[in-house]
Each structure stands twice: as C-alpha cells, then as structure tokens.
Image (cartoon, grey):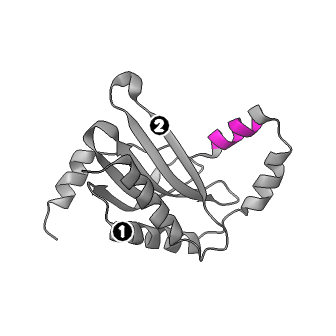
Amino acid sequence: MLTYEDVIQLRDEALRHTLSLPVPPRMYELSGGGAAGRSWRAIGFFLTDAEGAQLVLELLDIVNEQVAALRVYQEAPSGTGPRFAFELLVERYDDQLALSAAAEFVSGAQEMSPRARDEDDAMLASFPDELRKAWMMAETPVPPPVSFDALRAARNTPS
C-alpha cells in the first residue's frame, strides 16, 4: 500500500540524488480529477533548457488506488509528446526505485543545457503576483497520460 507520504518521500529521495547537477531542479505539485471521481496528484521536479524542452521526474499518484507511476521523461516544446527514459508502477516505498529514477534524470540532465534558475527567479521577482503565478503554471509540466494496466502487465512480464 502506497501513501501520499510515501510518494513525497520517494520524490525527496530522488531529488537528493540530483545534488551534483550544476542547476538545481525546480519542484512542482499538481492535483485534479476530483470532479470526475478519480483524484490524482502529481509531484516531481524538472529542468528546462533555453529552447523550452523539459526533463521531468514525476510521481503520478492515483489516490483511490494507492499506486503511483514513477516516470522520467523529456518533453520538447514542439509538442511531439514525451519521450520516456524510465516508467514503472510503484505500490510501496522503495528507495532503490528513487535511486534508479534519479540516475536516469541525472543522465538526461547531463545531455541538456538547463536554463539557470537564478535568471528565472530574478525575472519573476519583478512580476506582480498574478503574473508570477501564471508564468509558474505555464512552466509546470503537465502529466502525460499513463496506463496503469500496461505498467502492471510490464511488471508481471519476465525479463
């Protein structure tokens, strides 16, 4: 059984393994689905390059099912869709999963030129609150669709 505290702990453990990166990732948290009766929460962190491409480590938590998808993906600003480097079903806390996902994230980060956060932060400091919030929402990754059935099947398939 996976709790939301476990999900946060997985995110924090993965983030701890990114400390060697020259640009610290930006954290985010989103939620939705309540009106449709299928609540979800997405938490994670990301880097953005100068062209707007993003590298994301995300835990997409399906509240009522007590499972999450742990994913590392790159998303280009062209909207061609995400390219997954890591994706698996998480049903209980396991720090080795966080370590594996973080290793994929660090590997992807070393292949890109992340935009320095201090430049963004300096620009944002001059914005009024509403504009700053809107900019942050526009920068926040949107969780791509996930098939939990496919992740369950992949978990149960021998290598």
**Residue 70 placement (x, y as % from top left):** 37, 56
SS under mark 2: strand
- The kind of residue tagged 1 is Asp
Q: Which residue is mark 2?
A: 31
Q: Residue at x 46, y 66 (%)?
A: 14
SS under mark 1: helix
Q: Quadrant of residue 99?
A: bottom left
Location of residue 82 with respect to 145 vertically, above or below: below
Q: Which residues are magenta?
A: 131-138
Q: Residues within 10 Å of mark 2 (few under 14, many from 20)?
A: few
Front residue of 104/93: it is 93
Q: Residue at x 71, y 40 (%)?
A: 135
| The C terminus lies in quadrant | bottom left
- Mark 1 or mark 2: which is in front? 1
**Residue 47 placement (x, y as % from top left):** 61, 60
Tell me: 102 left or right of 1.
right
Q: Which residue is mark 1?
A: 95
- The secondary structure making up most of the magenta span is helix
- Sequence-wise, the earlier of marks 1 and 2 is 2
Tell me: 105 left or right of 36.
right
